[in-house]
Image: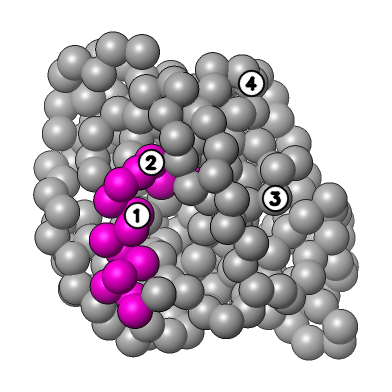
Amino acid sequence: MASSKLKMVIAGTASVALVGVMIGSSTPSGAVGTAPAAQNGPTAAVLKLIQPSYTATLTTAVVVRPYALCAASGVVPTKTTTSINGVSYHVGVAICPIVTGKTVINTSLQGTAETPAGRGTIWSSFGQPSTFPQLDGGTWTVAPATPRNYVVSPKIGKSESNLWGYPCVTIKPVNIGGKEYPLAECAGPMMENITNEPVRYGSAAYTQAAPNLPNPVGYAYPYVLTLLKLLGA
């Protein structure tokens, strides 16, 4: 795919089921997630936080605070678009666990504020906790990250998504082994790399998402290695 400016970069737009516990779903609070994403519920709320356009650079800071960790999440495409440095992308949404700890933030996208829009919102960011809630095969578990490499593909559900530095809304927690873990629904560009450039189909990428999750949050090489070094990983 061409990466010239003003080129619309589109991931697969067919309907893809996203499994998670959502506000407004019929799943009781604290159930292990099996409810599909609501298209007129939290999705609408988080899409309101996405700006029509961004000017982004690779300006980073390492902070300690709560954040939504989407590194192991799958993403559902929406019809909303956003422009980043003059290139238009479709926006996707994902369910991500909220964790607290050391995280690398992109200050050009999110500044230094702890939330995008106050109470009920949180930033998606990147960190390396020892364990965190992850969805695999319709079941939430708490486990260490399972990194894998994959090839970004035009096949439906096999594209790449970037949620680093983009906004989220907090949603109903998930109960895992009798303990509630906070969750967020996050939105960000699809087929855009953390270097703020389009990702080409055929690119080698890194994700922590299970292979059965659609359009995983991923990072095309090599800049993800820099993030890992910033975190001491």
User: Reading the chain from its start, which is encountered first: label 1 or label 3?
Assistant: 3
The residue drawn where x is 54% and y is 74% is 98
Q: Which residue is mark 2?
A: 220
223 left or right of 141? left
Q: Secondary structure at mark 1?
A: helix
Disc number for residue 54: none
- Can you identify the residue that label 4 sits on? 156
Q: Which residues are magenta?
A: 217-232
Residue type, label 2? Ala
Mark 2 or 4: in front is: 2
Render colour scheme: one colour
Q: Is residue 162 visible?
A: no
Badge 2 local density, few (<14 within 10 Å), some, or many (20+)?
many
- Which secondary structure lies at badge 2? strand
Q: Which mark is residue 224?
A: 1
Residue 176 part of the magenta-drawn span: no
Q: Residue at x 37, y 82 (%)?
A: 102
Res 40 quadrant in image: top right
